[in-house]
Image (cartoon, rainbow, N blue to C red):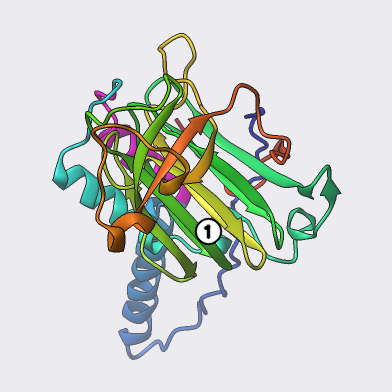
């Protein structure tokens, strides 16, 4: 769904006030003050040049965290914490998004509002992008095979429901498996970055926007059909929908389990349009 990245220069010119050349012939202190001020301003200019914008810091961190990214390879705990801490600090203005942008106005296309994806960067090791959801916008239930995914809700309130597969459970059919509900709650920004793993943390999830929402996503490695990392969509059914020999769940726990059936085609309510990212630029 990605497109080429749009670049907007983030350079800002700052005019420095003039330093007086007037000096006291009998006292040299003013000259020393001017030299001191000059040195301070040079240091200030140098520090500004070395400051890294949040998007660039995110990109640089992803390069380190996913340096050896391959299917099913989970970054070390230290690397996970490092990337999480960077994402936790990112604000909407750091990536050039605002609820006032047209992406967050409801535009009906088929049965649900149009969702916009702003592509920031993608390589074979990781991808970075922003999902822009107007109120009632939906990203249907889908998986992230052999991937580690970081999601940061930048603004808004969103309902998230996620699942993990129940290992070695008998199946009613080849395309239907038992899953345990991991999350079924509303989240409101600011909140912590969520992380899902290849086999834990809610690898299958769906998003429903309660208000206008923006979600910054980092995937490592990203989807790749040649590499076998296909995006699969699912229908979800209550546990009682199927009776399978060898599958038993206590009555009070049944709401925590559901059956997920693969969809043969993309969902009709999947209405995502890729648009050009126009936020702060990154340097590779």
Disc 1 is placed on an element classified as: helix
Report the front residue among 22 and 3.
Answer: 3
Q: Quadrant of residue 170?
A: top left
Q: Quadrant of residue 156?
A: bottom right
Tell me if residue 12 can be seen: no
The answer to whether 199 is drawn above or below residue 124 in the figure is: below
Magenta highlight range: 55-69
| Image coords of residue 153 (percent x, y) | 49, 60
* Residue 196 in the figure: left or right of residue 112: left
Q: Quadrant of the C terminus?
A: top left
Q: Residue at x 57, y 75 (%)?
A: 17
Q: Residue at x 40, y 87 (%)?
A: 25
Residue that numbered label 1 is attached to:
94
* Residue 101 in the figure: left or right of residue 264: right
| Secondary structure predominantly adopted by residues drawn in magenta | helix
Q: Residue 1 colored magenta?
A: no
Report the front residue among 93 and 71.
Answer: 71
The answer to whether 49 is drawn above or below residue 98 in the figure is: above
Tell me if residue 239 can be seen: yes
* Residue 150 in the figure: left or right of residue 21: left
Q: Residue at x 53, y 62 (%)?
A: 159
Q: Residue at x 41, y 36 (%)?
A: 219
């Amino acid at each position: 769904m990605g497109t080429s990245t749009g670049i907007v220069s983030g350079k800002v010119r700052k005019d420095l006030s003039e330093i007086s050349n007037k000096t006291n012939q009998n006292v040299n202190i003013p000259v020393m003050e001017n030299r001191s001020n000059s040195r301070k301003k040079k240091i200030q200019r140098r520090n500004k040049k070395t400051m890294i914008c949040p998007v660039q810091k995110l990109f640089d961190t992803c390069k380190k965290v996913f340096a050896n990214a391959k299917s099913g390879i989970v970054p070390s705990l230290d690397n996970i914490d490092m990337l999480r801490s960077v994402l936790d600090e990112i604000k909407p203005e750091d990536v050039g998004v605002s609820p006032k942008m047209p992406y967050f106005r409801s535009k009906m296309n088929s049965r649900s509002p149009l969702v916009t994806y702003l592509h920031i960067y993608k390589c074979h090791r990781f991808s970075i992008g922003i999902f822009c959801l107007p109120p009632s916008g939906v990203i249907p239930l889908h998986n992230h095979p052999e991937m580690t995914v970081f999601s940061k809700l930048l603004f808004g309130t969103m309902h998230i429901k996620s699942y993990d597969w129940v290992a070695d459970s008998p199946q009613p059919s080849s395309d239907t498996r038992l899953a345990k509900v991991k999350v079924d709650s509303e989240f409101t920004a600011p909140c912590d970055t969520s992380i899902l793993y290849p086999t834990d943390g809610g690898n299958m999830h769906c998003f429903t926007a309660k208000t206008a929402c923006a979600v910054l996503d980092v995937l490592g490695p990203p989807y790749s059909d040649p590499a076998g990392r296909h995006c699969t969509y699912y229908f979800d059914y209550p546990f009682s929908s199927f009776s399978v020999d060898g599958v038993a769940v206590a009555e009070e726990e049944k709401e925590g389990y559901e059956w997920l059936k693969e969809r043969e085609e993309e969902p009709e309510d999947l209405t995502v349009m890729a648009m050009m990212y126009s936020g702060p630029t990154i340097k590779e």
